[in-house]
Amino acid sequence: MISLYTSFQSKEFSCNIPDVKFAMTLTRAQVKVSVSKNGDSDVIYNEYLYPKSGGIVELTDVDRLIEPFALKWLVFGLSVRIEEQQLSDDGLETILSSSVRQLGCDVISCSANILSASATEFCNSHFLTLIDGPKVTAVGWAEFLTYIGTGTPRCLAKYDNGETRSLSVPVLLQTTEYTTIDCSPANFVISGSSLVSYTISAGNRSQSFSVDSLPEPDVAPVLLFYNSFGVQEMAYCTGEHQQVASFDRKQSRFGRVKKSYQIEEKETFKADTGYLTFPMANWWREVFRSKHVELIRVYDGRVLIERSLPIVINSEKSEMSNSADFIPRFTFEYEYADRNHNVWDARAEGRVFDNTFDNTFN
């Protein structure tokens, strides 16, 4: 009979799936690992394993095995079927007897090692974001939150005249597995008052936002990225933005005439996040660890999600210190992901300079 030393909770984060360990008394065990999504199931591992001393068998790095599916899906099913088999001694591998044990759970995509809560506890009490404190935003910026589970989203908004209002929150996408909501501050602006702060809640989850006092602080770049849970968030840089162009020319003489027969252009950008609060600084590292980042265009204070360009971050300086006078501020370099760096955008709306300059240059 199979003795299982591993158990799954009903929900597990993908990076925290435990190794499957069991003891057996028969000849071998067939271990079959399957993932399922929307009723479709795929076998991703199917092997015969043999016990070491003491009859112990261990399937390690299950988290690495399912990682491609965690990157592809937000929530999916995982099952492990273990069939212990007693074989005949005649060399024909006839199965004389067998027993079966199974493990299963719902896997939630997550690359962060969350120590303070189980997957179930986290999903019931948190949005799918790693920010641990108020998020700084501004009117005109786009903000998204995603959560797994139930709960009608509401906003408790506070204004500079002391007024507080409870408002509904637009739902962008709702499936049987998760809900994505639009938390942009523009949704909660009222005439005659300035929005100071607001808190988004859904069930037992809550996330507070602090609104910048400037009506439309200039930002460059604006980044859309996939966080540790595989959902989209927005990041805004309020510091200096620099652009450096370089050209790699291959030249040769054709007869008596020297010509450039190949020119490769490379646009490198240097960005500064601006001064950050400590919760925002810890959260900003999500951008640097993201495998998918897009540059979002901003015109006339509007964030145009549909006008995005994939980029790659090449380097970053994200140092932290416990010094009493330390204020977090990160810098990083990035470039367009596409091979063609000759990017032209006609929607400058009358501005002489591009988005590497602030709005005072018109």
Image (cartoon, rainbow, N blue to C red):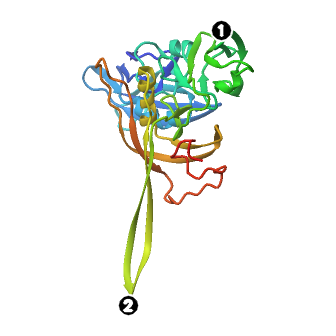
Q: What secondary structure is found at the residue carrying circle 2?
A: loop
Report crowding for label 1: few under 14, some 14 to 19, many 20 or more residues within 10 A (C-alpha).
few
| 232, 59: nearer the viewer | 232
Residue 174 in the figure: left or right of residue 137:
right
Residue that carries the numbered disc 2 in the rendered image: 256
Which of the two discs, 1 and 2, sits closer to the camera? 1
Residue 174, how many percent across, how many down?
Answer: 69, 26
Q: Secondary structure at mark 1?
A: loop
**Mark number for residue 162?**
1
- The residue drawn where x is 41% and y is 31% is 285
Q: Position of residue 319 (x, y in %)?
A: 32, 30
Amino acid type shown at disc 1: Gly
| Residue 298 image offset from top left, x and y in percent | 61, 42
Q: Residue furthest bottom?
A: 255
Q: In the rendered view of the protein, which quadrant contains the N terminus?
A: top left
Residue at 49% x, 35% y: name it. 237
Res 66 visible:
yes
* Of residues 31 and 143, the one drawn nearer to the viewer in this rendering: 143
Which residue does the image show at 68% across and 9% down from the upper left?
Answer: 164
> Between marks 1 and 2, how big is the CA–CA gap?
79 Å
